[in-house]
């Protein structure tokens, strides 16, 4: 129970360092159990995503080494997680690996034209079906 209390406290404080410390301190209880280990891996990923989003939020362009120094994780791990978050559309941006920079874009505006066109097509389909049924009754 102490192990889960430490994990819960680390999660509450959104502290990756405390989370990793709890995992190393209570390795036998937490990592050796496959069910708990799976849940803790997901929790760690969520904490990492939250911390990364909080760190990159004020920037439009930031060095990946700066992000990794703020989060205190290796650059490679930060880069991998940022690229996964971009692919999962957690935020909009690109990784410029040549310069070692993350470029963050503003949220794109949602274009309502597509939705309106789709609704019009669906309504036209209903009209055509209705006309077909009426023509079928006439013959």
Image (cartoon, rainbow, N blue to C red):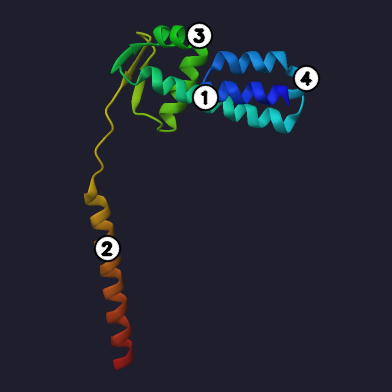
Q: Where is 110 relative to 103, above or below?
A: below
Left or right, residue 25 beside residue 51: right
Q: Where is 122 relative to 109, above or below?
A: below
Residue 28, numbered circle: 4
For marks 4 and 2, give the one nearer the viewer.
4
Q: Give the residue at x 32% y 76%.
A: 129
Mark 3: which secondary structure?
A: loop
Label 4 and label 3: CA atoms lie apart by: 25 Å
Mark closest to the chain's N terminus, 2 or 3: 3
Q: Nearer the viewer, residue 63 or 122?
A: 63
Q: Are marks 1 and 4 in contact (CB under 8 Å)?
A: no
Label 1 and label 4: CA atoms lie apart by: 22 Å
Q: Give the residue at x 59% y 22%.
A: 9
Mark closest to the chain's N terminus, 2 or 1: 1
Mark closest to the chain's N terminus, 1 or 4: 4
Mark closest to the chain's N terminus, 3 or 1: 1
Disc 1 residue crowd, few under 14, some 14–19, many 20+, Cα 10 Å: many
Left or right, residue 28 beside residue 60: right
Q: Give the residue at x 41% y 11%.
A: 67
Q: Position of residue 42 (x, y in %)?
A: 59, 30
Mark 2: which secondary structure?
A: helix
Question: Which quadrant holds residue 92?
Answer: top left
Q: Nearer the viewer, residue 42 or 65?
A: 42
Mark 1: which secondary structure?
A: helix
Q: Which residue is mark 2?
A: 121
Label 3 and label 1: CA atoms lie apart by: 14 Å
Q: Where is 121 relative to 87, above or below?
A: below
Residue 47, numbered circle: 1
Q: Which residue is mark 3?
A: 72
Q: Are marks 4 and 3 in contact (CB under 8 Å)?
A: no
């Amino acid at each position: 129970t102490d192990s889960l209390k430490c994990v819960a406290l680390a999660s509450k404080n959104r502290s990756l360092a405390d989370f990793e410390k709890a995992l190393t301190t209570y390795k036998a209880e937490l990592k050796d159990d496959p069910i708990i280990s799976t849940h803790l891996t997901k929790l760690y990923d969520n904490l990492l995503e939250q911390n990364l989003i909080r760190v990159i939020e004020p920037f439009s362009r930031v060095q990946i080494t700066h992000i990794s120094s703020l989060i205190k994780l290796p650059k490679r791990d930060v880069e991998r997680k940022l690229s996964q978050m971009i692919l999962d559309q957690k935020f909009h941006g690109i990784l410029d690996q040549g310069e070692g920079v993350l470029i963050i874009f503003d949220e794109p505006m949602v274009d309502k034209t597509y939705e309106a066109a789709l609704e019009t097509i669906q309504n036209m389909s209903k009209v055509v079906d209705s006309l077909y049924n009426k023509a079928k009754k006439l013959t």
